[in-house]
Image: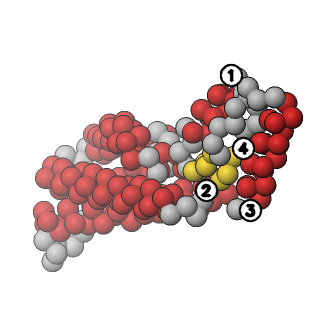
Amino acid sequence: MKEHKYAFRFFVILTDIILVDLCLKLAYILKFGQETPVEDYYFSFFYVFTISWVAAGLLCNIYRASRIFDFKRFLNNLFFVLCFHILVVGIYIVNLKGYNFSRLQILSSYGFLLSFVILFRFLLSAAFQYYKGISYYIRKIVIVGGGKSAEDLFGYFSKQDTTVYRFMEEVSSGLMEEAYEDEVSSRLEELQEF
């Protein structure tokens, strides 16, 4: 997964840009109708809205691979992204003295945006969980040894979000040295069969 993290990040950023533009257009059509031509100041508003959403996402690290596939972590960071985005868009509107922007259009844009982004991320997370479940991306790990360092290694590999690790059953370190080496070599032979 690490070798594909930039491709996933690019895919999610591109999808967010498309979703933001779609939400802005839907909200504009909802408020003004399809026949109404888009005003010039709305084009600049669309650009600022889109760029500030991607910038807020990059600032809050919601495009990192570990956060792309973890839906709960994404929901925690979505609040901060939304606050930062509202702040940037609000500053833009006040500096432009663009009080003629439709509040209903802006509010419905945020409603559509939150709905579509949450739905997309949920589907992406569910697809990744399915992908992890069909075991195409399982790494097999053998931890030889015991004590605190083996427990630390087991804990580290167990907490990885983007990769599934399969562990062989625990080999008791209380065996005699010769029996222990036989047990480890038989476990390694089982791994080679995979």
Say which element carries label 2.
strand
- Against 94, residue 100 (above or below) is below
Callout 4 amino acid: Val
Alpha carbon distance from label 3 to label 2: 15 Å
Alpha carbon distance from label 1 to label 3: 29 Å
Mark 3 crowdedness (10 Å alpha carbons): few <14, some 14-19, many ≥20: few
Give percent across and percent down for residue 74: 40, 44
Mark 1 crowdedness (10 Å alpha carbons): few <14, some 14-19, many ≥20: few
Q: In the image, which is nearer the foreground, mark 4 or mark 3?
A: 3
Callout 2 amino acid: Ile
Q: Which of the 4 quarters of the picture holds residue 31? A: bottom left
Callout 3 amino acid: Glu
Viewer-nearest residue: 98 or 60: 60
Q: Name the residue under label 2.
A: 138
Mark 4 crowdedness (10 Å alpha carbons): few <14, some 14-19, many ≥20: some
Quick check: can you spot residue 21? yes
Give percent across and percent down for residue 164: 57, 50
What number is the disc on residue 193? Answer: 3
Say which element carries label 3.
helix
Q: Mark 1 points at which residue?
A: 148
Alpha carbon distance from label 4 to label 3: 14 Å
Whichever of labels 1 and 4 marks the residue nearer the N terminus, that label is 4
